[in-house]
Image: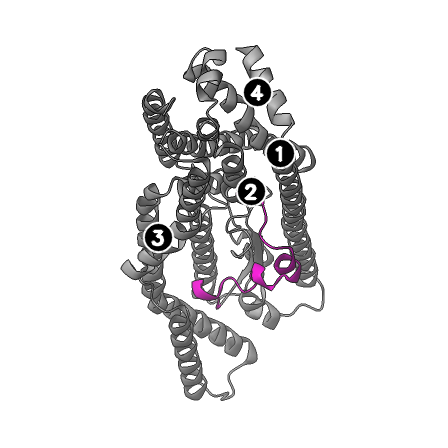
Amino acid sequence: MMRLVLHDLRLLARQRLVLVVLAVGLVASALAAVNGARWIDHLTQARSGFLERAAADESAYRARFVSDAWTDVDSANAPFTTRRAFAYPVPLLADFSVGRSDVEPSMARVRMGYRSDMLFRNYQLDNPERLLRGRLDLAFIAVVVAPLLLIALGYGVFSADRDRGTAQLLLAQAGGMGRLLLARSVNRVPLVLLPLALAALALVAVGPQEDGRIAAAALWFAVTTAGLLFWWAVILLVNAMRVSAETAALVLVATWALLVLVAPPLVNAAARAAHPPPSRMAQIIDGRFAEQAATAAYRNDHPSDGTPELQRVKDVIAEYQRISMALEASIGPVAQRFDDQLQAQQTVVSRLAWLSPPMTVSAALAGIAGTDTASYHALRIASRQHLHRYTAALDRGIADNRLFTLADHDALPRFAPPPRPLPHFIGVGWTLLLALLFGWWASRRYAAVAVG
């Protein structure tokens, strides 16, 4: 068997197409690795820089709090001026699968008057470097580019021999169809996986040295291998039909286009049509109108009438907090409907994705990387809960009609990220099941068409 594998490898090495496929795979994977390394470095530096600035601001604020220039009026106004900053953890494998890490906000400050719909203000889309660099990552190579390279190597894995009339001779030399196909599979699939493996090893070596990163990278590569095994099973099945090599190439490219390019937007469009979300803009406009109306009414009803400044500041802060909490309560149902519709959309997508195994593989890769929709949904929920805890802590101090102290400031809650959601591998299992089914079907047909 080893002699057969080596003989097929020597034949492969003489083909220019193999060198082109290998070169394209190496160049594309190298570019993806460079982009991934830069992206996770950007996320890490942006997060650390934001937290460092927030820590410096908090230290300066605490220093003012204990200085002689700090007055009782400042203490009364402190619930409004104090703030807390937080940042999401950098996704474990954001350099492998960018996923939603390039569009989801990950850093915010909380303070009195902030609502859930205005918690995040800075989005990654504002980053010109990100827009220039594009979205070429290893996940894109694994899901989009690698299957095409595998098709280029395997579209005529047996049909070309049948077209040339050399099928019987090759079968006799190999000792059977199974041995021949195994030898050709062993040489072609690893050839496409090799550039991805080298790029993954490079990212693990130069990326953040976090606990669990190596295991996650190994799992990520295993899912990538499962996706390519599905495509190889499809290639074998098409070769098992009574078609020419050119027809097999056309069928395989059309299948790739249908599953990789056409299916995802159709599935997403169906999900949005089935569960359209409410308007975010309408939610923001309604909230701002309500805030302006409530604030104006309070100012009209409470003019400065000789009330001592300290008490007046306390009253203003208390009323502002009441207005903010009332607005949060009124807008909360709209935000909840938006989240419910989003979750319903994701349910539809996850169900329809079974029609396209590459979609399930892509979702699993993003889930392992921590850049999938579910991970960011969990983080958004945690950030809203943090905002509610922060607001409730301020409200308890304001309700007592007492001055805000440094101990109150230090006791304000800090953000705690939730555990990472476990990725779902049911879709990957379905992909492997299809690969086994197509492989079995192909093996049954090869005996009938070997000499046809």
Q: Is residue 65 above or below residue 242?
A: below
Kind of residue at badge 2:
Ile
Name the residue: 40% across, 45% down: 259
378 left or right of 404 in image: left
136 in the magenta segment? yes
Q: Position of residue 23 (x, y in %)?
A: 66, 38
Marks 1 and 3: which is nearer the front? 1
Q: Which residue is mark 3?
A: 267
**Mark 2: few, some, or many residues within 10 Å (few <14, many ≥20)?**
many
Q: Which residue is mark 2?
A: 141
Element under disc 2: helix
Element under disc 3: helix
Name the residue: 48% across, 32% down: 156
Which contiguous range is marked in magenta?
113-139
Kind of residue at badge 1:
Pro
The front one of 368 and 360 is 360
Kind of residue at badge 3:
Val
Q: Which residue is mark 4?
A: 8
Residues under labels 2 and 1: Cα distance? 10 Å
Name the residue: 42% across, 38% down: 248
